[in-house]
Amino acid sequence: MANMADGMNYAPKGKPAPVVKPGEFVFSAAALDHGHIMGMCRGLIDAGGTLKSVYDPDPKKVADFIRQFPGTIAAKSEGELLSDKDVMLIAGAAVPSERCALGLRVMDAGKDYFTDKTPLISLEQLDAAKTKTRATNKKYMVYYSERLHSEAGVYAGDLIADGAIGRVVQVIGTGPHRLSAASRPDWFFIKEKYGGILCDIGSHQVEQFLFYTGAKDAVVTKSQVANYNNPQYPELEDFGDAMLLADNGATNYFRVDWFNPDGFQAWGDGRTFILGTQGFIELRKYANIGFSDGGDHVFMANGEREMHLQVSGKVGYPFFGELILDCLNRTEKAMTQEHAFKAAELCVRAQMQADPPGPGRGFGFWFGVFGERGGGGTGPPPPPICSSSFREGQTSFMTISISAAFFSLIIGPGRSPAAS
Amino acid sequence: MANMADGMNYAPKGKPAPVVKPGEFVFSAAALDHGHIMGMCRGLIDAGGTLKSVYDPDPKKVADFIRQFPGTIAAKSEGELLSDKDVMLIAGAAVPSERCALGLRVMDAGKDYFTDKTPLISLEQLDAAKTKTRATNKKYMVYYSERLHSEAGVYAGDLIADGAIGRVVQVIGTGPHRLSAASRPDWFFIKEKYGGILCDIGSHQVEQFLFYTGAKDAVVTKSQVANYNNPQYPELEDFGDAMLLADNGATNYFRVDWFNPDGFQAWGDGRTFILGTQGFIELRKYANIGFSDGGDHVFMANGEREMHLQVSGKVGYPFFGELILDCLNRTEKAMTQEHAFKAAELCVRAQMQADPPGPGRGFGFWFGVFGERGGGGTGPPPPPICSSSFREGQTSFMTISISAAFFSLIIGPGRSPAAS
């Protein structure tokens, strides 16, 4: 029988204390388009940061924000924040397509930038962001909240660092989210604004894979997206998944979706499964289905034991204090710039590969394979709207071109029932 | 707050009773190479079947078997079983590479065949099996035990049929297994005998995907295998995973591995995650990590409720009685022949695509992508030993040939550090 230990040997290290005194690290908030801005600011404040001011063109968003953070100055323009010599960092949760542009302005103003995930939505934006960080020596940090603001997520990193499960060889992440369509802003349903499901909520997953495996680089070996059940929102992708292979041989699968049902107790049953050579870890981040005691459940088994710990309130969120000190000391302990950008790059690539420009390639493939039996004539569930196993713009580009041409020859564009 | 209901509206239907009286359905057992033969025979006996005789060339295996099933006649040869006019079906758990040949002999003898999974390990064997079933009108049924002999697995099918989670759009399955290398027979480590990890224990996963989604056909869109941590067994694949796309648009990801750690209470933390348009189901089949109350845990959430039921002893295994009646009545209620063969075909294809003949293609790809930074020079974890996103022998064969040629041109076989 397994040892159902209380995890004594793997006790959490305890919550970090504030790292600076009031006024030693002053920041502001700009662009309140996503609610994540609240968590971003809360994390920095709890770590000792001083929130001075806020700007958004929508006065209602600003009023809501100030209710959460009383005493914050409502600036009259973004420029007022950018020119404030007290402000060292600007936190922003803009519409995804605008996050990079805001970051460029922030860094040009000589401040560090802390953006909600996904930090950007195209390789062009990535290039611009990289160039600007080099030119200004400023930071473009990212709120990958599903690890950084999850005590279970943080504690998993500690367990791995302690060698509790050996070398990590694979990570599986599932990130179901509740759609709550009625409460979503318009941009949520416009793909060129939200960036696609793999780029948006998939960014959390890619970041966790890189972090838990210690990888510096990876390739997307397969990715696909679908709109399975929301035809009323034609640009919504309600499903996406991907496989990645890291430079150190570790592999990843993740699925993200907008199908979290209303009867589930939390906004999503986010899980992470980390497979090591000597054991495994499972995280139930936001709820433990069947129980009503909240989230932050960490399960682990290795050669010696089986363990279940609920780590709420026991681990804290060291990222925020580390980020403040990184800004003050120009170090990279919270997260390297390279890591932040690599996760961004890979979620963009996953999205690009799943959803290439040009009509019908994904569809054509599957209809060519299945012929008349596939979704085309029978009516029921549509296949993923696009699907690709190939990398673009690198060594296999020739393969893509050839296969695309080949399929269109034998299938013809008319066989595609819909283009995404 | 969610409704943590006791599942009253989704109560299991109760265990099935025996379907025949003693002597009405007589069967025998041949080839005791895998311990699954015990479960196969137990299932048939509990459903009313009469076990008459057993044959295996190894007297120790026969003695162990008769200890489990006292009164079984130890036959002197396989021919004695095949020529026994009382015997309607022969159950076998041969070495995987020999399962098809045994089936052909059984069907030639005018009897139905019930084999352990994986039922066969090549497309040639599949063709032979199909041809023989057509010629003899006999059955080649398969013990896909991870659904058929799992009350949680059976109950999930009932929930889906009741519409509890809407239309199934995706299935994720994880099948970690304990290696227990010391207790394994020689054939376990010889790939041409066990067939590869995706073909072997992956067959369960493919079968569940087809069943829960109601799919008739699918394609393997990505598959890969690895030997991450067992270099002492060079032909063992200790890791494999795959993605499939069904003809009805549903998708699948599964992972199988031999990393289940000794500290875990069961032989593997087998899970199934079934995503529907209106909810989801999670199965924890063999254990509920962190608890010591056994397996068969079913979790479900949909628009109305969140539910947790442990269904041990409440559902039973209807497959076996249905199979007996199918044999007597020449019906296909337990499982259609088409379904049994399609799961077999797809696990073989997943294996073939992950591990094509010819040296170095999989490796070559990744080393081409990562250049010197990949596992080649740095020493640490090896990448998956082979990897492929392509289908062979069908519409995309041309793509494979071209890409393989392309990669060998730019990379060269010398860059591959090992061939599987």
Image (cartoon, coloured by chain):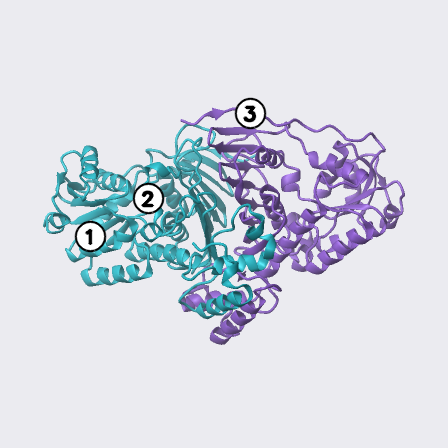
Chain colours: A purple, B cyan
Q: Is residue B392 above or below residue B325?
A: below
Q: Give x and y (percent) for residue A131.
A: 77, 56
Q: Residue at x 66, y 39 (%)?
A: A148
- Residue kind at label 2, given as amino acid type: Ser
Label 3 CA crowd tier, 10 Å (few <14, some 14–19, many 20+): few
Give yes or no for contact between labels 1 and 2 (Cβ–Cβ under 8 Å).
no
Report the Cα–Cα distance between label 3 and label 2. 37 Å
Residue under pointer 2:
B145
Instruction: Have a look at marks 1 and 3 and say if they share a chain.
Output: no
Q: Nearer the viewer, residue A77 or B115?
A: B115
**Which chain hosts label 3?**
A
Q: Nearer the viewer, residue A64 or B78?
A: B78
Q: Nearer the viewer, residue B275 or A339?
A: A339
Instruction: Have a look at marks 3 and 2 and say if they share a chain.
Output: no
- Residue kind at label 3, given as amino acid type: Asn
Q: Which quadrant is the C terminus of chain B positioned in?
A: bottom left
Residue under pointer 1:
B112
Is residue A28 toward the left or the right of residue B267 in the image?
A: right
Q: Is residue B181 above or below residue A242?
A: above
Q: Quadrant of residue A233?
A: bottom right
Q: Nearer the viewer, residue B333 or A342?
A: A342
**Which chain hosts label 2?**
B
Residue under pointer 3:
A9
Choose the circle earlier in sequence order: 1 or 2: 1
Q: Give x and y (percent) for residue A24.
A: 84, 33
Q: Residue at x 35, y 54 (%)?
A: B343
